[in-house]
Amino acid sequence: MSQNNIQSNSIQNPRVTWEGCSVLLDINDGDRLVFARLTAGSTLKIGSKNFSLRPLIGCPFGSSFQIENGTEGLCLCRFVPSTEVDNNDQEKGGSQIMEECRDNRAIVDNNEAQTLTSGDIDEMRRQGVKGDEIIEALIANSATYEKKTTFSQEKYRIKKQKKYAPRVLLRRPSARSICEAYFKKYPHRIGFLRVDALSLLLSLANVTANSDILLVDMVGGLLTGAVAERLGAGTGYVCNTYLGSTPYPVEIVRTFNFDNEICKRIVRAPLRDLCLEQTGTSEIIDASNAELNGQTSSINMEEMSLPSNHEAVDSETIISPQSKMGKPPKAGEKASEEAIKSWKENGFSSLIIAAPDADAWSLAKDLLPLLSYSAPFAIYHQYLQPLATCMHNLQQGKMAIGLQISEPWLREYQVLPSRTHPLMQMSAFGGYILSGTKICSSS
């Protein structure tokens, strides 16, 4: 049975969902972001009702779904958003922006503008009226809709659409979408690593195909998955190293839907094994990082990982019965002796550290000797001071050149007619990255 699973996994179309795959559900244009595994019994709670996710199986990523009345009642049905714009309406819209003189000053919000009652809406739902038709009825029975500005009318329509015709966008779990989802709701689980900082990490570390990347991933596996995604199938290795005997949790890797070829390239090896021959003994590393071990051992694994049933980013849970057929391949197996021996002889291609709860300098001084000469490295931290101290020590020890500390900053804009401006609520801080190139020390 396992052979059949491997074969079906190897020929799976990555553009289309399959039973057992992980997906990111974007509800009402970012109002909620939910991770889920598509199985026959998986459900998604929208409002006060649970909806089966079976209609999502076999659909292309990027498909949109809307709650409609089906043969068995309300269900998620796929629909194609209308993109056609009438030429006359487009021309009127352009002139209306310049000539519109209406405003909302004369509108009094006294809850008397709408003539449709909640009982009328419930009766329409019982009769099988679609959500879009309910919205049009609300607009037609509103005494103030025509008096509103175009912008206010659009906001009114979107508000009613989210309530009476919720929509679900089927997104592919990728490094960007996963990072954005976690950063939006639970940034502490990924060390406040923003998507622009993540992309800069991969760029400064020169993550390319056929590279052997050494990682310290204490952000739940997001960094591991992002590096493996960029390496691709069958090229290079991602080696997660850790202090002590317990590896850091990398459960987020399972949401990437990696196949067996990529999963077997994600390995782990304790720092003791990688440094044993170079230092002659592992006791020095254990003693120098005893305090660090005490800090990392106190990390709550549940806070840094995604549960097996994929806890929703908005603190809800998608119900996914256990299914052997849908179980994703496991990544993060122990590295082979041959691979460790090769890395000791040739060194790693690059180093990336994302350890908000560890001392940057303590990790850098132990891990830099494992790199090949002229190999780049990048260290992420939420705060500046640990990286400044690490940079100073690297300069004093003449261990690296091209040292610089970067502060990425991503600014989002709302681009709409006559109202283009930066978003009112956005992140103003994305951490810091120390980068450089290892050299052969003369001492």
Image (spheres, rainbow, N blue to C red):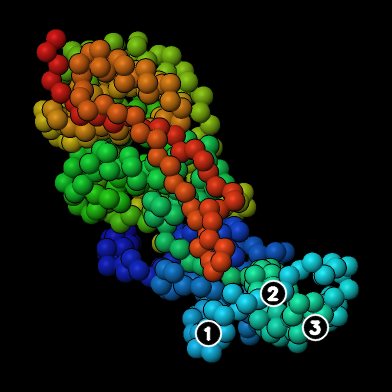
Question: Mark 2 and 3 residues: CB-CB less than 8 Å, in contact?
Answer: no
Question: Which residue is found at the position 59% from the left and 70% from the top?
Answer: 167
The residue identified by callout 1 is 91
The amino acid beneath tag 1 is Glu
- Give the side of residue 308 with respect to residue 31, left or right: left
Quarter-of-image position of residue 66: bottom right
Mark 2 vs mark 3, CA separation in Å: 23 Å
- Give the side of residue 413 with respect to residue 176, left or right: right
Of the two numbered discs 1 and 2 in the rendering, the one whose residue sits closer to the viewer: 2
Mark 1 vs mark 3, CA separation in Å: 27 Å
Under circle 1, the secondary element is helix
Under circle 2, the secondary element is loop
The spot of residue 186 in percent (x, y) is 55, 43
Image: 317 above or below 439:
below
Q: Residues within 10 Å of mark 2 (few under 14, many from 20)?
A: few
Question: Mark 1 and 2 residues: CB-CB less than 8 Å, in contact?
Answer: no
Question: Which residue is found at the position 49% from the left and 38% from the top?
Answer: 429
Q: Earlier in the sequence, mark 2 or mark 3?
A: 2
